[in-house]
């Protein structure tokens, strides 16, 4: 493992919580130059508690962007596994997760380790405000923009009520309690069979589904909608207004990447 590579990627925006989780996992298995990563996608999925499909999509995206590179193959129990390397130059070019405090030019103070004026110990030069000091958000809006902000239980409950009330009555609408548990698991990222999604995305997908089917001859049961992540057809890749879906709200990481790239996500 390499602390240097791990620290580097932890402070870079990968684009989503799923991508960040996989990138940190890879960095933890890299040498200081980013090479020597040998692990299967199945193991990554198991250890990060992501679906194998999600890991495969992330790894493909990383390869396409040049962030990771295949450097060879190694035999394993089930055949062979690719060996990867993280391109440190590409990793360093990613936007940073934190804003600089500008403390690099702060005046230097001369202090003794013991605090005593006549102490015989050597004098140390210390910045009163270290360059890496991070000031916590000062208001609720900034907290809401934080990468790791989570919805409160009351917000999840209100969102599920909106989802449940919107669901067509002519469907097999049953098991409200079980659906509520599944809904909360998906939002919190604790569902092992469905990728994490926010409440707004799930509800927007259901709304788009209803609007594109005025007759509503066939509507899956609410639990089937959640278990099969039906909203992805309307809010994920290929969704959006042109294909019957609504635009998916940008996450914090996606907004940072959009601003870093001059307005294009």
Image (tube, rainbow, N blue to C red):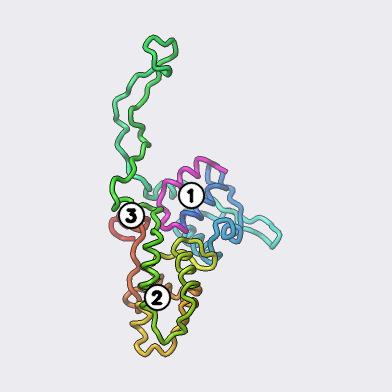
Q: Say which residue label 2 marks.
A: 164
Which residue in the rendered view is the most extreme toward the right? 77
Tell which tag, 3 or 2, sits nearer the viewer: 2
Q: CA distance from mark 3 to mark 1?
A: 32 Å
Residue in the picture at 31% in, 33% down: 103
Which quarter of the rendered picture does the N terminus lie within? top right
Which residues fall within the magenta stretch?
1-18
Q: Nearer the viewer, residue 222 or 217?
A: 222
Describe residue 37's horizontal placement relative to residue 142 as left or right: right
Q: CA distance from mark 3 to mark 2?
A: 25 Å
> Where's residue 62, x and y in %?
47, 58
Residue 263 picture quarter: bottom left
What is the number of the mark on residue 87? 1
Q: CA distance from mark 2 to mark 1?
A: 46 Å
Up/down of 150 relative to 118, above or below: below
Residue in the picture at 35% in, 34% down: 131
> Where's residue 228, x and y in %?
50, 75
| Kind of element beneath mark 2 | helix
Crowding at label 2, few (<14), some or many (≥20) Cα neighbours within 10 Å?
A: some
Q: How many marks?
A: 3
Q: Say which residue label 3 marks.
A: 144
């Amino acid at each position: 493992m390499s602390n240097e590579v791990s620290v580097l990627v932890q402070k870079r925006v990968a684009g989503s919580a799923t991508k960040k989780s996989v990138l940190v996992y890879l960095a933890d298995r890299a040498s200081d130059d980013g090479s020597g990563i040998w692990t299967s996608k199945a193991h990554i999925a198991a250890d990060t508690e992501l679906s194998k499909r999600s890991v495969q999509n992330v790894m493909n995206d990383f390869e396409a962007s040049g962030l990771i590179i295949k450097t060879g193959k190694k035999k394993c129990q089930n055949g062979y596994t690719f060996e990867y390397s993280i391109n440190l130059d590409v990793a360093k070019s990613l936007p940073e997760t934190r804003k600089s405090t500008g403390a690099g030019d702060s005046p230097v103070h001369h202090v003794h380790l013991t605090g005593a004026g006549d102490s015989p110990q050597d004098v140390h030069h210390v910045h009163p405000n270290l360059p890496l000091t991070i000031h916590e958000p000062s208001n609720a809006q900034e907290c809401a923009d934080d990468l790791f902000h989570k919805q409160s239980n009351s917000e999840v409950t209100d969102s599920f009520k909106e989802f449940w009330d919107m669901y067509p009555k002519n469907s097999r609408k049953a098991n409200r309690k079980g659906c509520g548990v599944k809904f909360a698991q998906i939002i919190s990222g604790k569902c092992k069979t469905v990728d994490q999604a926010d409440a707004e995305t799930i509800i927007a997908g259901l709304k788009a589904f209803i609007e594109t089917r005025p007759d509503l001859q066939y509507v899956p049961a609410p639990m089937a909608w959640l278990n099969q992540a039906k909203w992805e057809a309307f809010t994920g890749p290929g969704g959006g207004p042109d294909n019957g879906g609504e635009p998916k709200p940008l996450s914090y990481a996606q907004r940072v990447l959009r601003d870093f790239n001059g307005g294009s996500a």
